[in-house]
Image (cartoon, helix red, strand yellow):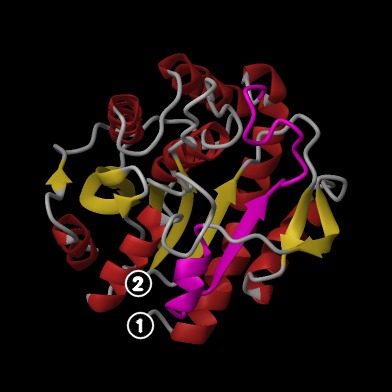
Amino acid sequence: MLSLVTALAAVGPGAAVTAQPATPARASRFDGAVALRHIERLVTIGPRAAGSPASGRARDYIVAELRKAGAQVRVLAFDADTPNGRLKMANVIGVVPGRRPDAVMIAGHYDTKWFPDFRFVGANDGGSSTALVLELARTLAAAPREFTYWLALLDGEEAFGAWTATDSLYGSRRLAQDLARRRELPRAVIVADMIGDRDLAIRREAFSTPWLTDAIWASAHALGFDRHFLADATSVEDDHVPFLQAGVPATLLIDFDYPPWHTAGDTLDKVSAQSLQVVGDVLLGALPAIEAHLAREGGGKR
């Protein structure tokens, strides 16, 4: 794992490394109520568009929580050319070492979309993915697994104007590009986005790697959550796509049927601890099958 950690620390200009992690918490069960409290704290910060001072405050909170969970934290800073000018952004990765160096990355974005004419706090769109990843970091660090886990909070998922190939996915495009160049890509990537909706209904994402999606849906079925993980499919371009393009198996969990999407109504009352609990339990339930598949395919070697 040291080679992967070193590589992550060196990615991109201005990469910063935090101090050693704190001792992880004892409990190893995902707690939706804890995840919801993360959303509450992020919403209190307010709009958190990439490159803004509020984004920096959100990032400081993320780093502190990952360290508190017991993860080894890396802040990977980079500059991005956007319709709003050249902005400083940063991806944050909490590394939870496993018994082998092969990494599975679970990711979400922590930025909120920039709107000049109304206040957008992004409780679900930005908040829920951040909360899920932070609580998964605590859970995984408390009971290390066979594979190493990267808990990634990505910057700049949102477009500043109309969604285009160059105005969107700033953090995931940069991270996938840099890791591919260094031949340090993870073995699989799971991206979550907008998974806190009180009326949770996640459809299979059509771009995603089938076997990886199947493992997650099988876990949902085993846990009795078929009403939340639906059989029909939809197509959504999100932070999983740059990793698919780099040849990494990747899947996206997103409930895109969310009326307050990109409105001032995406507030704390629209999300629930129960929905966060469902997604956290399903992901943790899927990890043994995902690890077994990767072990069969790669034998622990990249």
In the rendered image, the vertical position of residue 173 relative to residue 268, given as above or below: below
Residue under the point 49% across and 37% down: 113
Query: Where in the figure is residue 39, as x and y percent of width and height?
Result: 52, 24
Q: Is 244 above or below relative to 94?
A: below
For label 1, the crowd category at 10 Å Cα-Cα, with few meaning under 14, some 14 to 19 and many 20 or more, is few
Quarter of the view holding residue 81: bottom left
Left or right: residue 112 versus residue 279 is left
Q: Position of residue 101 (x, y in %)?
A: 31, 68
The reply to whether residue 261 is in sight is yes
Question: Is 194 part of what is drawn in magenta?
Answer: no
The circle on residue 302 is 1
Q: Position of residue 180 (x, y in %)?
A: 31, 75
Residue 185, labelled with which disc?
2
Residue drawn at (62%, 19%) of the image: 268
The percent position of residue 300, horizontal first and vertical second, equals: 39, 79
Whether residue 99 can be seen here = no
Instruction: Give the amino acid at mark 1.
Output: Arg
Local SS, label 2: loop
Give the residue displayed 34% in from the left and 36% down from the top: 66
**Label 2 packing within 10 angstroms: few (<14), some (14-19), many (20+):** many
**Tags 1 and 2 in contact by the CB under 8 Å rule?**
yes
In the displayed structure image, the side of residue 115 where residue 33 appears, left or right: right
The stretch in magenta equals: 239-265
- Give the camera-side residue of 261 and 109: 261
Sooner in the amino-acid sequence: mark 1 or mark 2: 2
Mark 1 vs mark 2: in front? 2
The residue tagged with tag 1: helix, strand or loop? loop
Quarter location, residue 172: bottom left
